[in-house]
Amino acid sequence: MLLKAAPAFSLLNPHKELLNPLSSSVSSSSLHLNSSLRAKNGAGVIVCASKGASNSPLTGVVFEPFEEVKKELDLVPSVPQVSLARQKYHEHCEAAVNEQINVEYNVSYVYHAMFAYFDRDNVALRGLAKFFKESSIEEREHAEKFMEYQNKRGGKVKLASILMPLTEFDHAEKGDALYAMELTLSLEKLTNEKLLNLHKVANQHHDVQLADFVESKFLSEQIEAIKKISEYVAQLRRVGKGHGVWHFDQMLLEEAEVVA
């Protein structure tokens, strides 16, 4: 198919003869616009055509569909159950994203259980309870980000089962605060390992977009979280199981108020 648009303006020679750039008398391959625009008798600007090096058409728009576009058009699915947006999204990448969604939800579930434990009246560590509640919400938000990305790439979100977490976190030697925080550090490192595996799958299938999504949205944040939790573990190891835990809990409350 060949579409030709009407000329936007006419080309005049010095004798005011209409030049047709598509006619046989003046070849479009031998015309170019004169670099100087000349005014004559104050009537306005006269654009002159002359023989030169330009081989592009002076007027009109010639459009020919690219062969690549024709190929892509043939690939557009007609079945309503198939995504229209999906492009170069390997099924292994899709499966890896669904696995990461499950990891984020499982970690969120554990943190929510920790929140419930430290919120008990006979535990009453409100700083730790608030910290783990916010951590649970953050992990759930991460899962939702992956779900949104899955839909954006044309994949299908498949939610897997979530394991039942612990309900008791008191440890005979470490106490509840230190044990819970060490468990948190292990979970953050595990999440980071899973993110690196997802990034590896993206690289294996040359999915630059998925690799960039993991790098820009999660990896840097995960390293910062590991550093912060590591400091909390070190501080709790110093204070022991007694009165120092209460002071640590108050510190978490103060940090939360500053952030708010």
Image (cartoon, helix red, strand yellow):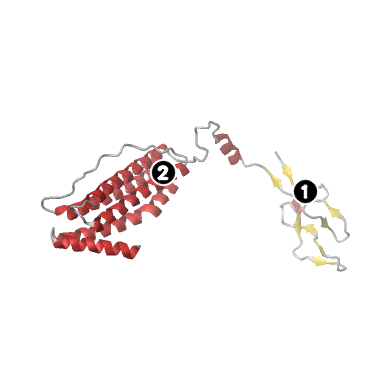
**Crowd class of label 1 (few under 14; some 14 to 19; many from 20; radius 10 Å):** few
Dividing the picture into quadrants, the one containing residue 77 is top right
Q: Is residue 158 above or below residue 16?
A: above
Mark 2 or mark 1, earlier in chain: 1
Is residue 206 visible in the rendered structure shown here? Answer: no
Q: Is residue 243 above or below residue 153?
A: below
Residue 123, disc = none
Quadrant including the C terminus? bottom left
Element at label 2:
helix
Residue 31 drawn at (x, y percent): 76, 55
The three-letter code of the residue at mark 1 reads: Ala
In this rendering, the label closer to the viewer, 2 or 1: 2
Residue type at mark 2: give it: Met
Crowding near pointer 2: few (<14 within 10 Å), some, many (20+)?
Answer: many
The spot of residue 253 in percent (x, y) is 27, 62
Q: Nearer the viewer, residue 210 or 114?
A: 114
Looking at the image, residue 228 sits to the left or right of residue 31; the answer is: left
Residue drawn at 79 percent across, 48 percent down:
22
- From the viewer's perspective, tell me whether residue 65 is left or right of residue 184: right
Q: Position of residue 89 (x, y in %)?
A: 45, 40
Q: Residue at x 44, y 39 (%)?
A: 155
Q: Which residue is mark 1?
A: 6
Q: Nearer the viewer, residue 55 or 58?
A: 58
How far apart, in angstroms, are the residues tagged by discs 2 and 1? 48 Å
CB contact under 8 Å: marks 2 and 1:
no
The local secondary structure at tag 1 comes to loop
**Apparent side of residue 260 relative to residue 166 in the rendered image (left or right):** right
Circle 2 is placed at which residue position? 147
133 w.r.t. 249: above or below: above
Name the image quarter holding the N terminus.
top right
Percent of width and height locating residue 252 = 26, 61
